[in-house]
Image (spheres, rainbow, N blue to C red):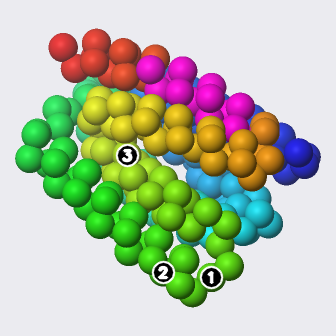
Amino acid sequence: MSILEIIAVAVSFLGIWLTAKRRMLCWPVNLLACALYFKIFLDVRLYADMLLQALFGIGILYGWIAWARGREEAGAVVVAPLPRARAVFGLATGAVGAIAIGWGMHRFTDASLPWMDAALSSFSLVAQYWTARRHAASWLLWIVVDIVYVGMFAIKGLWLTGGLYAAMIVLAMLGYRRWRRASQ
């Protein structure tokens, strides 16, 4: 556990909490968290997760714009339904991405846990896209992904980050409940 990991955990927790509350401030806070975790994952050779942080940075900029456009006059971010066909397509895309990224990480790098890291990274991108599109279902995917992340971070000895992801499971449950309520 490093001081960088401690700071990254605190910033990440704040960013997820702000996202669950549908606050626009979540985007710059989450962008900072991505930068911090990019460095951490580079240090522990979780390259797919390192690249994921860079892609999250792009996704965060997209989400920031999408949320700014998807607000009511009162300023509240509007939750949008996720059509079944789009959900199936998103999950299939996540699976294909997991295989492609996993193969590349396994074949061309010295990545630690390349297949698990790749699958989590790929499905995290799907969840991030769904969050940017304001779909409450994003939280359900985050719950599943975060559960597996807790195990992976325990294996890598990133105990504080594993604890963050355990807390993020709870935040995702709260986010799902809040977003479902807001959509009704």
On the rendered structure, is 39 left or right of 31?
right
What residue is shown with label 3? 127
From the viewer's perspective, tell me whether residue 73 is left or right of residue 15. left
Q: CA distance from mark 2 to mark 1?
A: 8 Å
> What's the distance in space between the residues labelled 3 and 2, CA to CA?
22 Å
Compared to 183, does 140 lie above or below?
below
Q: Position of residue 164 (x, y in %)?
A: 68, 33
x, y percent for residue 105: 54, 76
Which residue sits at x=57%, y=30%?
168
The amino acid type, in three-letter code, at marker 3 is Ala
**Contact flag, marks 2 and 1 (Cβ < 8 Å):** yes
Q: Which residue is mark 2?
A: 104
Secondary element under disc 1, as helix, strand or loop, is loop
Check disc 2: other Cα within 10 Å, few if <14, some if 14-19, many if 20+.
Answer: some
Q: Residue type at mark 2: give it.
A: Gly
- In the image, the segment drawn in magenta is 161-173
- Residue sitting farthest toward the bottom: 108
Packing grade of label 1 (10 A; few <14, some 14-19, many >=20) is few
